[in-house]
Structures are given as C-alpha cells and as structure tokens.
Amino acid sequence: MANTVLFMEDVFVTFDGFKALNKLNFSMDYGELRCVIGPNGAGKTTLLDVVTGKIKPDSGEVIFKETTHLTRMKQEEIANAGIGRKFQTPTIYENLTVRDNLELSVKQDKTVKAMLLGAVAGSAGEKVDETLEITGLRDKQSWRAGLLAHGEKQWLEIGMVVVQDPDLLLVDEPVAGMTDRETENTAVLLKRIAEERSVMVIEHDMKFVREIANRVTVLHEGAVICEGSIDHVHEDPQVIELYLGRG
Ligand code: ADP
Ligand code: MG
C-alpha cells in the first residue's frame, strides 16, 4: 500500500444497534480524485466523519499516508496531519472580505512546523493569492463574502480548506443547490485542486461525477458494493437496481 493516501479496513460504526458502516473496506491512492456515491443513508457522511475523527469507529483501521493511524487521534490532530474537510453548512464570515476569510484560514495553521519555518506571514499572502486564482475569486477578493452568489460562497469555502494545504481534501456534496454553470465551474475547480493533492468527493449528481471522477466507489448499507470507472459502475447490475430498479 505504498501509494495509498487513505486505507480503511473492516470499519464498523453503530448507532443504537444500526450499522451505519458495516465492515467498510476502502482505499485510495495519492493524487486520486475519487467520487463516493450511494443512496441516502448509505453511510457516505459517516465515512467522512470517521476519517476526520468526528466519529470513532467501533472497530477497524483507518490509516492515512501509510503510517498515521487516525482512529487513535483527535479531530485537531487529524486536521494538522493534513486532512481538510469542506462541510455542507456555511462557515464563512459574511461581514469580512473574501480575502480576509482566506487569510484567517491560513493563519489558523498554527502547527509547530509552520511556526518553526517562521514564514507564515510571507507565504500566507502567496497562498491566498494562489487560492484566489484557483477559485476564480481574485476579482472579488475585496467583496464582502456575504455578497457572493451561492456557488461563489461554496468555492470560497473550498478555498478556505485548500489554503491550509491539506494532502487529502474531503468534500461532501459540493454542487448541491448550484446552477448548471456553477456546477461546471466546480468540476474545473476540483480537478485543478486534485492536480496537487488527493481529493474525495461525495456526490449525488451523476453528471457531475462523470465529469470529474477517476474512480467511483458505490456505497450501500455501510459497505462498498462496486468500484471502478464511471462506466463500469453504471453497468453494474446491483448499482442499476439500487438507482433505477424501483423506479
Ligand atoms: P449518507 O451521507 O450516505 O446519506 P449517513 O452517513 O449520513 O448517510 O447516515 C448513514 C445512516 O446512519 C443513516 O441511516 C443515518 O440515519 C444514520 N445516522 C447517521 N448519523 C447518525 C447519528 N448521529 N445517530 C444515529 N443515526 C445516525
Ligand atoms: Mg450525507
């Protein structure tokens, strides 16, 4: 597993006897842009909660970058180790400018490494500039964040995680509520981000998944039922049954 950024083995999570993750096995390589799909209640968000340490599994292993055992770490430790998550709920400061929001996010990176390097202030500006560029928000950097359109707010939030330079970025349903145009831009944005890091995207929108994914993992009842290219997944009888069979 030398090329494995995230490795999960036999992970169980139980809520009041209900198995939200049921012997989940999952792994992804460095540099992948992986999409995780599955019906409501499949356990997708729970998977992210386990990776970020919000939920501790009943049993199983979760290993980041081959040697970092996440199940023994606190949420802040996991974030500092290089896993960033964009939440579905808004976390931007509406009254601050776009640029201020990004600068605040960089400065929250108070790891020993960053402080020892002593370059936080100087490199922060560069990181913010780069992130403004990637998210397409450079021309709006002095706007109050509250004035941004829905899609732009989502990109700012993705930027606020990316600016912290995670090795693995986790994004839960990034295009929910977006226009077609915003969805297309989000695809471009995530592909760009994935050039420099590993990205896991949870998403329902199949058109969007087709647009971005290298590999797709289908989750059902807390376990992986199918994995591969989008075409492979689309032709899988069990997946067809899940998505279309009862229609
Ligand atoms: P998905 O994101 O794929 O829609 P979730 O991971 O949110 O699914 O949820 C998986 C299952 O676990 C669902 O049946 C959900 O109701 C249940 N669940 C999730 N979180 C909790 C919780 N904190 N307490 C009880 N049940 C939960
Ligand atoms: Mg969910």
Image (spheres, rainbow, N blue to C red):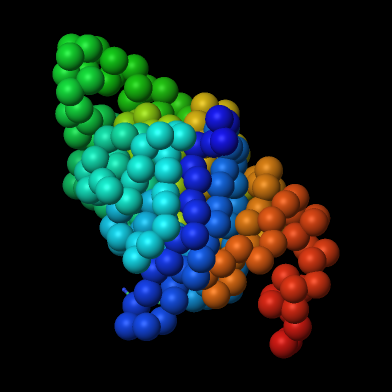
Q: Is residue 195 left or right of residue 214?
A: left
Q: Quadrant of the N terminus?
A: top right
Q: Nearer the viewer, residue 239 or 130?
A: 239
Q: Residue at x 78, y 63 (%)?
A: 234
| Spot occupied by residue 45 in the image (x, y as percentages of width and height) | 43, 63
The one of 14 and 97 positioned closer to us in this rendering? 14
- Along the line of sight, the residue nearer the viewer: 208 or 200: 200
For the view shown, which residue lies furthest in the bottom direction? 246
Q: Which quarter of the figure has residue 106?
A: top left
In this rendering, position of residue 13 left or right of residue 237: left
Residue 189 visible somewhere in the drawing: no
Q: Is 139 placed above or below 241 here? A: above
- Count numbered badges in the picture: 0
* Residue in the foreground of this view, choosing between 15 and 131: 15
Classify 201 as above or below 131. below
Q: Position of residue 242 (x, y in %)?
A: 69, 77
**Residue at image x 37%, y 57%?**
50
Is 246 positioned to the left or the right of 188 in the image? right
Q: Position of residue 241 (x, y in %)?
A: 75, 78
Residue depicted at x 56% and y 67%:
223
**Is residue 53 visible from the viewing direction of this image?**
yes
Q: Position of residue 170 (x, y in %)?
A: 44, 47
Q: Quadrant of ligand 1?
A: bottom left
Q: Quadrant of residue 116?
A: top left
- Quadrant housing the C terminus: bottom right
Residue pictured at 72% horizontal, 70% vertical: 239
